[in-house]
Every structure is written in C-alpha cells, then in structure tokens.
C-alpha cells in the first residue's frame, strides 16, 4: 500500500505541476495563466501593458510566471521520484514532504482569499481580493485534497514498517 499511495501522489504531482499548470502557457505569457478562470487574454494584456511602468505592479503580474517555474521544479521532482526512487520509502519521503507543504500552504492562501478563514477562524480576507471568492473556492478543495494525499504519502514513507515474519516451509 505504501508504494501504491506514493506512486499515486507522485503521478498527481507530475500531472498537476507539469500538465495542468503548464497547459495554458503562463510561463512565457503571464496572462495565459489566468485564462482557465475566465480572464480574457487580450484584456489582461491591455491591463498589464498599462501598468508595466509602475514597478511593483509589474512585478506582481510577473510573479505568475515564477509560479509556473516553481511548478516545473515540483513536477520534475515528482517525475524523478517516479523513475528513480523507491516509492513508499524514506528515499522518496522528502519529495512528498515538499509537495505536501506546498499544497497545504496554497490551500490556506486560497482559503483566505475565498473568505473561509474569516468565516471559521476570524482571519480576514485580503481587502482587494474578497470579490474573487467564487473563482478561488474550488482551488481550496483541489489543493486541500492534494495536501492530504501528499501528507499521507509522506507519513507512509517515513513510518517504520513492521518486521517481516520469516516464511516457513
């Protein structure tokens, strides 16, 4: 079971990070990274062209490209784990830990934007993002499910296995 959960977690990470996150082409065009949530590509380009001279605003827009680059690193780590590491062992545990940490933190960040942390824990939604709740809420559940999967894979990989009983003839 350890190896199976580990393999599934690595497959999900590879597909999510290298497939889904890269499919729009946001690495080389940050506006493409927003098309899956209904942002018009040409409108985004017009807006970013209008703020490109404003320093920190341009950096905020360019940060989406850095997110795609980060995802490539995670995806390549997952592929490496799938190809070269023994699944369900301490050998691959660090890959699961990195993925679990990423997914849990993204889930919490998305939950704040969606207003869920304010509703349940009194942590306010970022002032200029509250209107985005309907777009972000599904990602809370997606990244939350990933976090659980990756955490289970990590815990299974680092816990000691019971000693094997000697086979009798």
Image (tube, grey):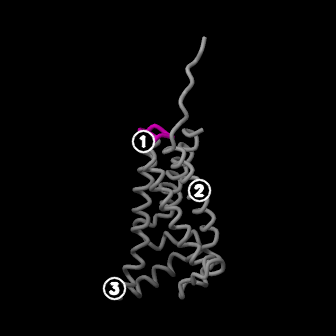
How far is the residue under mark 1 from the one under mark 2?
20 Å
Helix, strand or loop for disc 1: helix
Instruction: Residue under label 1, please give it.
Output: 91
Dot 1 crowding, Cα within 10 Å, few <14, some 14–19, many 20+: some
In percent of the image, x 53 and y 48: which residue is there? 155
The quadrant the N terminus occupies is top right
Q: Which mark sits nearer the N-terminus, 1 or 2?
A: 1
Q: Using a 10 Å C-alpha cutoff, classify the residue at mark 2 as few (fewer than 14 neighbours), some (14 to 19) or many (20 or more).
A: some
Label 2 secondary element: helix
Which residue is painted at 46% across and 49% down in the image? 78
| Residue in the picture at 54% in, 54% down | 151
Q: Residue beneath label 2, please?
A: 148
Is residue 112 covered in magenta? no
- Residues at marks 3 and 2 touching, judged by CB atoms closer than 8 Å: no
Identify which residue, 106 or 61, lies in the foreground: 106
Is 86 inside the magenta-drawn segment? Answer: yes
Image coordinates of residue 88 in percent, x first then y, are: 51, 40
Depth check: give the residue in front, 93 or 145: 93
Marks 3 and 2, Cα distance to the nearest angstrom?
38 Å
For the residues labelled 3 and 1, say whether their Cβ atoms are less than 8 Å apart. no
Left or right, 95 with respect to 148, comes to: left
**What segment carries the magenta color?**
83-90
Between 108 and 74, the residue placed more toward the observer is 108
Give coordinates of residue 109: x percent, y percent. 53, 73
- The quadrant holding residue 2 is top right
3 or 1: mark nearer the eye: 1
**Outermost top residue:** 169
- Look at mark 3 in the image and give the residue it sits on: 55
């Amino acid at each position: 079971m350890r190896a199976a959960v580990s393999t599934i977690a690595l497959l999900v990470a590879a597909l999510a990070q290298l497939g889904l996150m890269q499919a729009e082409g946001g690495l080389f065009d940050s506006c493409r990274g927003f098309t899956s949530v209904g942002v018009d590509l040409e409108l985004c380009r017009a807006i970013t062209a209008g703020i490109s001279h404003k320093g920190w605003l341009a950096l905020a827009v360019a940060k989406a490209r850095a997110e795609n680059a980060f995802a490539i690193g995670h995806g390549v780590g997952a592929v490496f784990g799938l190809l070269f590491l023994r699944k369900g062992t301490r050998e691959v545990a660090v890959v699961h830990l990195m993925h679990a940490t990423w997914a849990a933190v993204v889930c919490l960040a998305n939950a704040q934007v969606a207003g869920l942390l304010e509703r349940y824990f009194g942590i306010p939604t970022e002032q200029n993002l509250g209107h985005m709740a309907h777009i972000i809420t599904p990602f809370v559940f997606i990244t939350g499910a990933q976090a659980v999967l990756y955490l289970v894979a990590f815990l299974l990989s680092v816990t000691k296995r019971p000693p094997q009983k000697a086979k009798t003839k």
